Image (tube, helix red, strand yellow):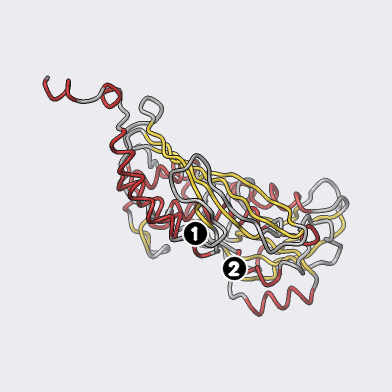
Amino acid sequence: MRSKRNKGAYAQAGVDITAADKTKDLIGAIVRRTFGVEVLSGIGHFGAFFKLGGYSEPVLVASTDGVGTKLKIAVQLDRHDSVGVDLVNHCVNDILCCGARPLFMLDYIAMGKLMPHKVAAIVEGLAGACSEVGCALIGGETAEMPGIYKTADYDLAGFIVGAVERSGIITGEKVVEGDVVVGLLSSGLHTNGYSLVRKIFGIDRDSLTLKVFYPELGMTLGEALLIPHRCYYNDLKPFLTEVHGLAHITGGGFAGNIPRILPEGLSIQIKRITWQIPPIFELIQNRGGVGEQEMFRVFNMGIGMVVICDRKIADHILAALPIAREIGNVVKTCGRNRVIID
């Protein structure tokens, strides 16, 4: 009883301020590695300062996203170093579709019980992915929320700001009939479809299913499901002024994302045989009895980014990027279907 009385009332309620202070100390050194000369503030102020320069007519591009229930897999395997990578790469890819260069990012981590080593692992992933694309991890928030999250559970969200010259904004308005559709290969599921996968394999009932080795995958199911979301910024940066449209294939798949960049009267015709669907998707489809149409609505099916451009630029991209495949072309719309997969 004596030790319990000596413990602070807030700590007895489930919130440990001492752990929060330790967490700040751990992550401070990690995030400073992402700072460039544009960052004018350190860690711990009420806000973060970033000096914007190098643009004639800059337009800021902002986006926010999370990792979804992929986090459940990370918790069950107690591996937290890759979900930060997922978050950064997803957010960077989203603003890349507008032609934007990532400037800075903020994260939000909410946990049932604050565990400094777990936060540090997440932030290591965030910082590493930010460094890869020259993005500053400029700030964030770590919240301990007992009663909202179970002890081991947490949520992770990110907020990114990028910039693009007004003349260089990519909207899809330049897409024309006859343009080539180039697909960039994904690294796996990225960050979508995990609720369905968890149900199909009964992962919530028995986490040991994550440790089953599948020869067709060359790894365990858990390892395959935690492969990080691929980032396409460095691959596409040299071509941004030439492409007509970019679509990040996330939730909603092909049909849910490609029409967002298509002018009225145009559709995309995709040849299914132009790339090999990774084994992880075939395993999910066969194990769950999921129809092919739904598979293409839920998952990226091996294509994480779609690039629309003219033939000359398409040839340059195909020659420069080993992950690039010519998968189709732009056609006039016939009926209501904007994405036709043959």
Residue at horizontal 35 percent and vertical 33 percent from the top:
112
* Residue 194 seen by the camera: no
* Residue 85 rendering spot, x and y as whole percentages: 47, 56
Residue at horizontal 31 percent and vertical 53 percent from the top:
211
Read off the residue under disc 2. 234
Location of the C terminus (image quadrant):
bottom right
Residue in the foreground of this view, choosing between 154 and 326: 154
Q: Comparing marks 1 and 2, which lies closer to the viewer?
A: 1
* Residue 223 seen by the camera: yes
Q: Amino acid at mark 2?
A: Asn
Q: Which mark is residue 35?
A: 1
Q: Is residue 177 left or right of residue 301?
A: right
Mark 1 and mark 2 lie on one chain; the one further toward the N terminus is 1
Q: Amino acid at mark 1?
A: Phe
Question: Element at badge 1?
Answer: loop
Residue at horizontal 12 percent and vertical 19 percent from the top:
1
Q: Is residue 318 left or right of residue 91?
A: right
Question: Element at badge 2?
Answer: helix
Q: Is residue 299 above or below residue 174?
A: above
* Residue 294 rendering spot, x and y as whole percentages: 62, 46
Residue in the foreground of this view, choosing between 185 and 135: 135
Residue in the foreground of this view, choosing between 215 and 24: 24
